[in-house]
Amino acid sequence: METTTIQPAVTSNNATDFLPLQGTDYVEFYVGNAKQAAHFYKTAFGFQSLAYAGPETGMKDKVSYVIRQNKLTFVLTTPLRINNPVADHIYKHGDGVKVLALKVEDAANAFEETVKRGAKPYLETTVLKDDDGEVVLSGIHTYGDTIHLFVERKNYNGVFMPGFRAWKSNYNPAETGLLYVDHCVGNVGWNQMNPWVSFYEQVMGFTNILSFDDKDISTEYSALMSKVMSNGNGYVKFPINEPAEGKKKSQVEEYLDFYNGEGVQHVAIATHDIVKTVTELQQRGIEFLSIPDSYYETVLDRVGTIDEDLQPLQELGVLIDRDEEGYLLQIFSKPLEDRPTLFFEIIQRKGAKSFGKGNFKALFEALEREQDARGNL
């Protein structure tokens, strides 16, 4: 199979897009200690305190801290007792992404349209109210234990949503230039990519805009296959990876082993200045994959002229790729957890709409070096 490029089915109005999405509302992580995780993300990534929910606000079985940077919102949730779905999720998977919340105009309609097309319900339409208005939620299951929540907040003026109070903190490190979610990548099991592609096509009206086979994403030792799914307006993109046969274990297999199932592999976060952002993140302790100097000896021959000086990109380990629309700069962190599961991508797009195909080999080799050091290759 050759790599194929399919143009997104951009819709002109809501009548032709049965699930119009306005973007990512928030990403919720189930974690072992939300208070410490919030401190980490504030310190290392430059998030600011936004909202809190817990026993003091009437939520007795768990606590959630909400942090924000520009249009990027994370929710960090921890159980307070055993025999709790959040506790069970963490025991099975470790810290990881539970909810990819999507902003919609009409959460009830989003639920109705997706469920009638085959989605498994997670949360029937629920209206949350307080003095600041109302938020309407609904939700469906997707791969593994991951959830899509549909969030309608057009009639709400509060800090986050009912049940939360403003979280004020004297400790608010400077931001690092992180802007919004560019895309979220899911890892699924053997031969499960196409069924989940069909799910996003049929249930959510997405389009497969890019496909990569094991010839595109491979090294001497391992391989994977990936398809990029995009909603009608292109605001929400979900690449889906599955393992492919190789001499040794691929990064997707390692993830599936340690996460104990399918789930979100990484969240890609946009920035307008990747050199400034990554420099700041490294100074705050975030570790990124190392790229050999040999990559930079020929990269400009492949991608052509870029606006940035190559030297700082090389010093940081930033990868470069170009498509018909422009170029992009990207870098991948090492796993953020002790289990080699969740990591982050920082991406700056200079017109490019693609996902760095030209960097796959260098990226995979960097990942394999880390796998080998862990004894998991």
Image: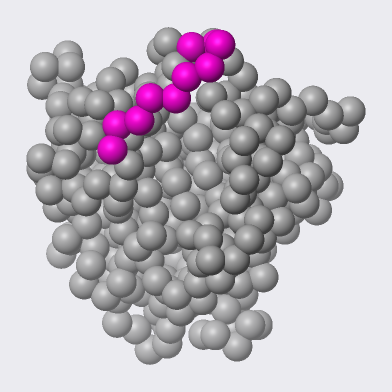
As drawn, 342 above or below 62: below
Of 259 and 84, nearer the camera is 84
> Is residue 32 positioned above or below 114 on the image?
below
Name the spot of residue 352 as percent of width and height, x first: 40, 34
Give me the residue at 21% from left, 72% from top: 191
In the image, which residues are magenta?
124-133
The reply to whether the magenta stretch includes residue 8 is: no
Main SS category, magenta section: strand
Front residue of this view, candidates 262 and 291 = 262
Residue 189 drawn above or below residue 300: below
Task: Say left or right for 41 vs 117.
Answer: right
Q: Residue furthest right?
A: 170
Q: Quadrant of residue 208?
A: top left
Residue visible at 38% across and 60% down? 145
The residue lying at 68 percent from left, 41 percent from top is 55
Q: Residue at x 12, y 48 (%)?
A: 118
Is residue 367 in view?
no
**Quarter-of-image position of residue 31:** bottom right
